[in-house]
Image (cartoon, rainbow, N blue to C red):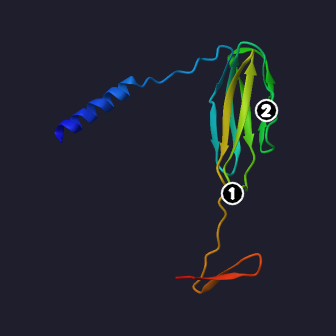
Amino acid sequence: MKLRSIFASILASVALIGCVQEELPALKNIEVTPSYFTFGVEGGTKELKVTSAAAWEIKEALPEWVTVSALKGNASEKGESVTVTVAASTDTLARTAYLNFTCAGETQLVTVNQDAFVPDFPEFKAGDYWIVFEKGAALPLSSA
């Protein structure tokens, strides 16, 4: 039994050593930092820095809840500051937008996430409750 455990451990170790994480090629013409934002349900404003070898732009249309201070910019080795503003949400699902910064044929994706709105639910008091369906059928629920 011990021999099986030792053999399984050795096999797992060899499998892990054999796994090589492939690195993505670096972009040479554009770098946007950070490349990922998360906003709370209240929205807000955050800054990112765009460093580019040539003029850059965001070509795709943005969703109505995201605004960006500049959709185009010039080459800047020192980096250009761009403001991302997200509106407050009343959507009960989390939402995501992607900003595609393009420069000299290269594109860097910036992900903008916003938390879901969680409404306040009323406090239920002791008693019986009913779920009423569209066609008139009802199902009793007990508060217990």
Q: Amino acid at mark 2?
A: Ser
Depth order, front residue of 16/83? 16
Residue 40 image position (x, y, % from top left): 64, 48
User: Which image quadrant: the N terminus?
Assistant: top left
Depth order, front residue of 95/47? 95
Quarter assignment of residue 50: top right
Q: Are marks 1 and 2 in contact (CB under 8 Å)?
A: no
Residue 37 image position (x, y, % from top left): 64, 38
Looking at the picture, does residue 98 appear above or below residue 105? Answer: below
Q: Could you say which disc has been placed on residue 69 in the image?
A: 2
Residue at 61 percent of width and 76 percent of height: 123
Residue at 71 percent of width and 12 percent of height: 53
Quarter assignment of residue 126: bottom right
Residue at 73 percent of width and 25 percent of height: 101
Residue 113 image position (x, y, % from top left): 66, 42
Q: Count how many numbered circles sit on residues in the image.
A: 2
Quarter assignment of residue 90: bottom right
Viewed as shown, does residue 144 lie left or right of 44? left
Viewed as shown, does residue 137 lie left or right of 36? right
Looking at the picture, does residue 14 appear above or below residue 52? Answer: below
Looking at the picture, does residue 6 appear above or below residue 128? Answer: above
Alpha-carbon distance for marks 1 and 2? 27 Å
Residue 3 image position (x, y, % from top left): 18, 36
Residue at 31 percent of width and 29 percent of height: 13
The secondary element bearing badge 2 is classed as loop
Q: Could you say which disc has been placed on residue 92 in the image?
A: 1
Q: Amino acid at mark 1?
A: Thr
